[in-house]
Image: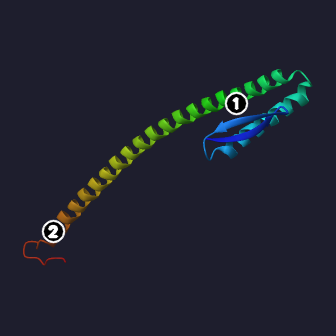
C-alpha cells in the first residue's frame, strides 16, 4: 500500500492507494482542486466545505451523464450487431441465389451447346 499527499481546497491530505496508482490519485486530486478553484471563482468565498461538496456534486453529475452515454452507446452497439448479422444473412442468401442462377445458366448453356453440336439429320456438327 502506497501513500500520497494530495492538496484539495488548500488543505493537504495523506491518502492511501494501491501500488502503481499514485499518479492516478494525484491527477484525480488535481482535477477536484481545479473544480474547487473554478467554483470559488464563480461563487466567491462560500465556505470550504460547501465548495468541496459542490465540486463533488459536479463530478457526480458528470459521472451520471457519462454512465448514461455509455449505456446508450452499448445499446447502439447491440443494435448495430443485430443489423450486421441481418446484413450478413442477406448477403449469404444473395450469394447463394446468384450462385444458383449462375449454375442454372451454365447448365442451360451446356445443354444448348450439346444440342447445337448434335449433327442435324445428315448434317455437320458445329464445334
Residue lying furthest left: 122
Which sits in the foreground, 38 or 88?
A: 38
Residue lying furthest right: 44
Q: Position of residue 123 (x, y in %)?
A: 11, 76
Q: Which image quarter is the N terminus in?
A: top right
Q: Position of residue 61 (x, y in %)?
A: 70, 26
Left or right of 88 on screen, residue 31: right
Q: Residue at x 20, y 60 (%)?
A: 107
Q: Secondary structure at mark 1?
A: helix
Left or right of 85 on screen, residue 58: right
On residue 114, the disc is 2
Above or below for 53 versus 21: above
Which sits in the foreground, 79 or 48?
A: 48
Above or below for 59 versus 25: above
Single out the mark in the foreground, 1 or 2: 1
- Dividing the picture into quadrants, the one containing residue 34 is top right
Mark 1, Cα crowd under 10 Å, few <14 / some 14-19 / many 20+, is: few
- Dividing the picture into quadrants, the one containing residue 125 is bottom left
Which sits in the foreground, 51 or 2?
A: 2
Above or below for 104 versus 90: below
Q: Position of residue 22 (x, y in %)?
A: 67, 44
Q: Position of residue 104 (x, y in %)?
A: 24, 56
Q: Which image quarter is the C terminus in?
A: bottom left
Left or right of 46 on screen, residue 106: left
Left or right of 32 on screen, residue 10: right
Mark 2, Cα crowd under 10 Å, few <14 / some 14-19 / many 20+, is: few
Mark 1 or mark 2, earlier in chain: 1
- Label 1, label 2: how many angstroms apart (C-alpha)? 76 Å
Circles 1, 2 touching at the beta carbon (< 8 Å): no
Q: Residue at x 52, y 33 (%)?
A: 75
The residue that mark 1 highlights is 62
Amino acid at each position: 500500500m502506497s501513500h500520497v499527499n494530495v492538496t484539495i481546497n488548500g488543505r493537504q491530505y495523506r491518502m492511501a492507494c494501491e501500488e502503481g496508482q499514485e499518479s492516478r490519485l494525484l491527477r484525480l486530486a488535481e482535477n477536484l482542486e481545479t473544480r474547487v478553484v473554478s467554483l470559488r471563482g464563480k461563487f466567491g468565498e462560500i465556505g470550504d466545505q460547501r465548495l468541496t461538496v459542490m465540486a463533488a456534486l459536479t463530478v457526480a453529475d458528470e459521472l451520471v451523464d457519462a454512465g448514461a452515454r455509455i449505456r446508450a452507446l452499448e445499446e447502439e452497439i447491440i443494435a448495430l450487431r443485430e443489423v450486421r448479422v441481418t446484413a450478413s444473412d442477406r448477403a449469404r442468401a444473395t450469394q447463394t441465389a446468384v450462385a444458383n442462377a449462375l449454375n442454372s445458366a451454365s447448365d442451360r448453356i451446356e445443354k444448348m451447346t450439346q444440342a447445337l453440336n448434335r449433327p442435324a439429320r445428315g448434317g455437320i456438327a458445329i464445334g
